[in-house]
């Protein structure tokens, strides 16, 4: 009788305005704690990664602006490959997150098998391009023969790391989808630290090794990818993360309905990441038309800005997991309420990244040893990026986190890609090739797309049509 009376009192309290307020505050604390738990490892991983990339770029900058431009252009091919892979893996990740929320472990392994098979196929295609068509690729962006030769030498070794990276990255995305981001963080730190050490040794010829320049940087990157793959495979097949263990036989367990659902959800993500990646290449094309020095300044500025955006990326990467798990549990209303809080967090984080970038702006050119016009361009480009970071953070979080978590991928595709190709890219190319604008103004024009994405994206998110349960409850 006492228990019933206490239970009734609790129910009354829960339904009262004070009880509702306390419940909302408790759930908000749970959300923020979960965001921090999932996002911090990703933030730390990307902070280490981008910091080491900056160290690598500082090393390469000692070889001259041509080397920076060559590695920047060649690295675009790897970037496109990573984005397309991310599209395939994110499509599977939507289901893995919801399967994890509903406790369907066998289907998680089937999804892993499918995404690994597709990922390997994509990796082989890009490896062939890097190994056999590198000159043709480099000539799209530069007529500087020195830049082309350096880029060809870089790609012939970088391409060897595409397949190992495709395997390792598949497990990275999957582990994040099951709320296990810490191990990928540790693997990334180890691999990137090894990469940086090997860069120093192979670029400059230390410890008895030959001086290989940019080719040494590519060899170091590929070796670190092999290490990353080996560590991920070990923890899945011989360690404590057997939930993601998959084999070719798991492909036979894939149901036709799942394949249809995967294609329906994934094709917009894959197309989105592909078109977005090609869009960044078109921006690089526009910047390259302004000369080797101008292009090099955009690469240096972007690397610094990427460091400032690590919190933004961590937030966007964790949101899909949180909302996907809630939808998998059948808690649609709670997922929607969480999305509102997450939008506010995204705006706050974006403002903070912009302010931090402004704070470090005066010292950046010194880090790379840039002087004169190049140094001035770097500072101006970073100022433009600082102004856009709030919009970029919100758009990342909304499109890749909120909208995709419920399978609203077609609308996310349109919002993410249409402003880029219809507005941003034409403005940037026209500014560089027709009007002859300075590089910082071309960069500013490329950010007009972010404002359009913000308006379209927030309107869609507030309609709640994205919040759909994609998986059946466990029988």
Image (cartoon, rainbow, N blue to C red):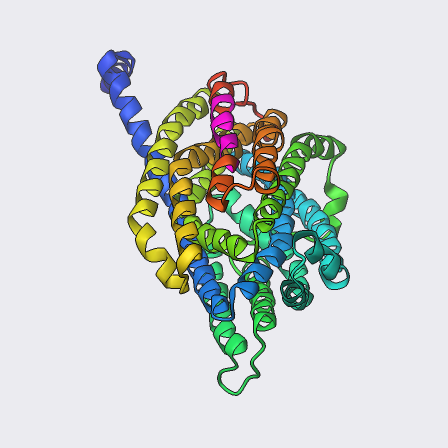
Viewer-nearest residue: 221 or 145: 145
In the image: residue 258, left or right of residue 2: right
Q: Residue at x 47, y 73 (%)?
A: 197
Where, quadrant-wise, is the C terminus in this rendering?
Answer: top right
Q: Main secondary structure of the magenta part?
A: helix
What residue is at 28 percent from the left and 28 percent from the top? 26
The vertical placement of 417 against 118, above or below, is above
* Residue 295 picture location, percent across and down: 54, 53
Left or right: where does residue 391 sit relative to residue 409?
A: left
User: Image height check: is 346 above or below 203?
Assistant: above
Stretch in magenta: 446-456
Give x and y (percent) for residue 207: 49, 85
* Quadrant of the snapshot with the N terminus: top left
Look at the image and say whether residue 445 sits in the magenta stretch. no
Residue 224 found in image quarter: bottom right
Q: Is residue 299 above or below residue 179?
A: below
Residue 325 in view in this figure: no
**Quarter-of-image position of residue 100:** top right
x and y, in percent, of residue 386 in the image:
38, 41
């Amino acid at each position: 009788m006492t228990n019933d009376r206490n239970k009734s009192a609790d129910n009354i309290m829960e339904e009262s305005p004070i009880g509702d307020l306390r419940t909302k505050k408790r759930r908000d604390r749970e959300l923020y704690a979960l965001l921090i738990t999932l996002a911090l490892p990703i933030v730390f991983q990307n902070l280490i990664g981008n910091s080491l990339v900056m160290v690598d770029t500082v090393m390469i900058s000692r070889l001259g602006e041509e080397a920076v431009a060559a590695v920047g252009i060649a690295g675009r091919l790897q970037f496109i490959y990573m984005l397309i892979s991310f599209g395939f893996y994110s499509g599977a990740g939507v289901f893995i997150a919801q399967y994890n929320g509903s406790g369907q472990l066998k289907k998680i392994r089937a999804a892993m098998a499918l995404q690994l098979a597709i990922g390997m196929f994509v990796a082989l295609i890009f490896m062939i391009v890097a190994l056999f068509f590198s000159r043709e690729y480099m000539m799209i962006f530069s007529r500087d023969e020195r830049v082309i030769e350096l880029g060809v030498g870089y790609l012939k070794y970088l391409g060897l790391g595409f397949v190992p990276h495709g395997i390792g990255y598949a497990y990275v995305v999957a582990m994040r989808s099951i709320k296990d981001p810490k191990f990928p963080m540790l693997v990334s730190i180890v691999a990137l630290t090894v990469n940086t050490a090997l860069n120093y040794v192979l670029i400059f010829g230390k410890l008895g090794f030959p001086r290989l320049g940019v080719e040494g940087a590519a060899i170091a990157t590929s070796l670190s990818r092999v290490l990353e793959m080996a560590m991920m495979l070990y923890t899945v097949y011989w360690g404590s993360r057997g939930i993601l263990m998959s084999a070719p036989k798991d492909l036979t367990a894939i149901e036709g309905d799942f394949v249809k659902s995967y294609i329906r959800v994934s094709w917009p993500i894959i197309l989105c990441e592909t078109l977005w990646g090609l869009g960044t290449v078109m921006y690089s094309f526009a910047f390259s038309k302004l000369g080797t020095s101008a292009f090099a300044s955009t690469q240096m500025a972007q690397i610094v800005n990427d460091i400032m955006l690590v919190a933004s990326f961590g937030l966007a990467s964790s949101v899909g997991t949180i909302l996907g798990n809630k939808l998998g549990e059948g808690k649609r209303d709670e997922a929607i309420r969480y999305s509102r809080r997450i939008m506010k967090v995204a705006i706050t984080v974006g403002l903070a990244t912009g302010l931090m970038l402004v704070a470090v702006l005066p010292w950046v050119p010194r880090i790379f040893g840039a002087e004169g016009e190049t140094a001035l361009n770097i500072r101006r480009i970073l100022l433009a990026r600082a102004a856009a970071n709030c919009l970029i953070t919100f758009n990342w979080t909304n499109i890749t986190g909120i909208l995709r978590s419920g399978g609203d991928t077609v609308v996310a595709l349109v919002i993410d890609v249409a402003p880029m190709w219809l507005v941003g890219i034409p403005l940037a190319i026209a500014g560089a090739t027709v009007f002859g604008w300075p590089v910082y103004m071309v960069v500013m024009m490329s950010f007009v797309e972010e404002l359009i994405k913000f308006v379209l994206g927030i309107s869609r998110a507030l309609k709640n049509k994205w919040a759909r349960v994609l998986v059946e409850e466990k029988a």
